[in-house]
Amino acid sequence: MSNQIEWRDSPGCFERHLQRRYRNPLFPAEKREISSEELKKARIKDDHDQWEFAKKYGILFSEANRLNEISPINDLMLCLQDTQNLLESAFSIGGHLEKEIGLLEILENNMIEILNSKLPQGADMLKQAHSLSAMNRIPYLAESKRSDTPILKGDELPSLLSEDIETIRCIGFLSRSFPDFKPDSNDVRVCLNNAIRNGLDTEYAKEVIEAWNKA
């Protein structure tokens, strides 16, 4: 493979994981180099994901277009659940899905608004369901929950610490909210210290641990 890989502008989750690993001291040495074959296979999987998503997206909107304020509550609830599931799937897939995500979020809001008007006593339940779904749309979490996730056992913490600072801060908050949540602060420190010995920038490591522990 050439010294410089030409990554896609908006990679899918499989290529994105190769980006995380590439020459990254957070990962073991054997995972820091990416072969042409690995990149090719990752892009094939990502392209397949996009194709499957497009099919599900079209089916959902064909069904949603038949619904309105007088539709049965069960049909509206099912549409909302399907919409939230597809939104979570979109964030697990990655790539160029900004337009589709925006339209799905509009549909989600419309379904919630109709259901709140028809079933005001269920507003708290809908709010909780939305909050849970929103958390599952954090790309790292969405990708890690896939049955075919590229984030293999042992890669979880290095992958997380390769994400943007806001994601690291958010997962750090979750770790403090649940006593048995893994990884915890000690796991993060150990991983960062090992990576520093492998060449990780100390200022970046400091930024990461501060984000993880931020109240």
Image: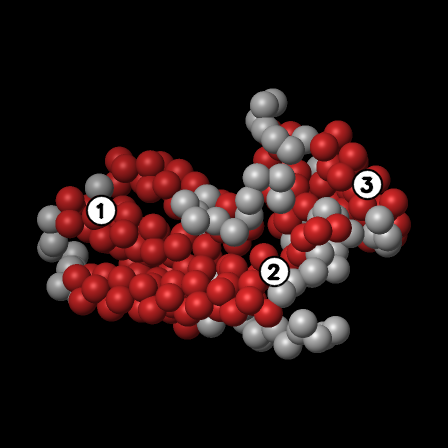
> In the image, which is nearer the foreground, mark 2 or mark 1?
2
Q: Secondary structure at mark 2?
A: helix
Q: Residues within 10 Å of mark 1 (few under 14, many from 20)?
A: some
Q: Residue at x 26, y 66 (%)?
A: 55
Q: Earlier in the sequence, mark 3 or mark 2?
A: 2
Q: Residue at x 61, y 73 (%)?
A: 7
Q: Residue at x 48, y 49 (%)?
A: 149
Q: Secondary structure at mark 1?
A: helix
Relative to 156, residue 3 above or below: below
Q: Which residue carries the number 3 mark?
A: 194
Screen quadrant of the C terminus:
top right
Q: Which residue carries the number 2 mark?
A: 18
Residue toward you, 133 or 35 = 35
Q: How many marks?
A: 3
Q: Position of residue 125 (x, y in %)?
A: 33, 36
The amino acid at mark 1 is Met
The amino acid at mark 3 is Asn
> Could you say which quadrant of the image residue 16 lies in?
bottom right
Q: Earlier in the sequence, mark 1 or mark 3?
A: 1
Image-based side of 67 in relation to 190, left or right: left
Q: Residue at x 67, y 72 (%)?
A: 1
Q: Which residue carries the number 1 mark?
A: 77
